[in-house]
Image: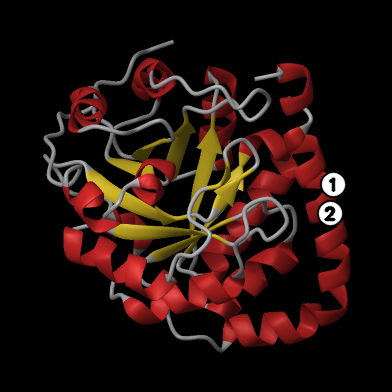
Amino acid sequence: MDTGVEGTILDRIVETKRHEVERLRPRAAELRSAAESSAAPRAFGAALRRGDVVAVIAEVKRRSPSAGWIRPELTVAEIASAYASAGASALSVLTDASYFGGSLADLAEAKAAVPIPVLRKDFVLDAVQLWEARAAGADAVLLIVRILDDARLRDLLALSLELGLSALVEVHTAGEVERALAAGAELIGVNNRDLATFHTDLSVSLDLAGLVPADRVLIGESGIRTPEDVDRLGGVGVDAILVGEHLMRAPDPGAAAAALVGRPRRERVTRIV
């Protein structure tokens, strides 16, 4: 992989997203009204607290900037139902169109097909996207520390709480863990993939797990493929895993998800730094 090129992918995604936000602004009042009148969200964070078992967030993902098309022909309701039947605790649905081939229609289809909570996975920069997510039926949203300054992160977390949305706050470094905790994040996702290079290393979650207090929900994201991977993460107290590409590439995504469900988890011991 040419990291000189790949390192610009996140910048391009964020720039594209800024343009999308500007196009959404004229609909802000409409989206806010729709968000505030939507049915109560399902409890995403509570679904991930499985005690001595690692919860699974199974992802619906058509493509990615690094891997290209993964499963373009997927039927969202079919995949979502297979995941739920396999024992997944929650779903993640990519809604970015330009780089991941997703949509809010995918999210709505998934939500209608299953009884478990659904995360809108996208690149959130602005309040209007939270209203949009809530109006579309999302139960949770992704907030990526790397693309938000501290003030914006706090504001978006506060608005998420006001709207009843859970916020999965994504980090990749010790410094970002510190920022997420300072902002008040309750759900912290450690992305094993560096969004600058798209290089994936499971040890990122293993190394950072001890920095996340035991009263927060810790999610390991990306690069998780085998029951042994889940066992390694569960061994350091990771509460849940988010798995996408591995499941999407499997001949039977439901069976692939089932193979990762029910793996043991130990209590997390927090390091003092």
Q: Which residue lies at the image location 34% right of the left edge and 79% below the top edge?
A: 113
Q: Quadrant of residue 218?
A: top left
Horizontal side of 204 relative to 106 (left or right) equals left
Crowd rating for badge 2 (residues with CA inside 10 Å; few <14, some 14–19, many 20+): some
The residue indicated by pointer 2 is 18
Q: On residue 15, which mark appears?
A: 1
Q: Are marks 1 and 2 in contact (CB under 8 Å)?
A: yes
- Which residue is at the front of the view, 27 or 8? 8
- Asked if residue 41 can be seen in this view, the reply is no
Q: In the figure, 95 relative to 203: above or below?
A: below
Q: On residue 210, which mark appears?
A: none
Horizontal side of 95 relative to 26 (left or right) equals left
Spatial CA span between label 1 and label 2 = 5 Å
- Asked if residue 271 can be seen in this view, the reply is yes
The N terminus lies in quadrant: top right
Q: Amino acid at mark 2?
A: Arg
Q: Amino acid at mark 1?
A: Glu
**SS at mark 2?**
helix
Horizontal side of 89 relative to 13 (left or right) equals left
Q: In the figure, 143 relative to 44: above or below?
A: above
- Which residue is at the front of the view, 217 or 113? 113
Q: Quadrant of residue 148?
A: top right
Q: Position of residue 39 (x, y in %)?
A: 45, 85
Q: Total of numbered circles in the picture?
A: 2
Q: Which residue lies at the image location 54% right of the left edge and 32% below the top edge?
A: 171
Crowd rating for badge 1 (residues with CA inside 10 Å; few <14, some 14–19, many 20+): few
The C terminus lies in quadrant: top left
Q: Position of residue 63 (x, y in %)?
A: 57, 50
**SS at mark 1?**
helix
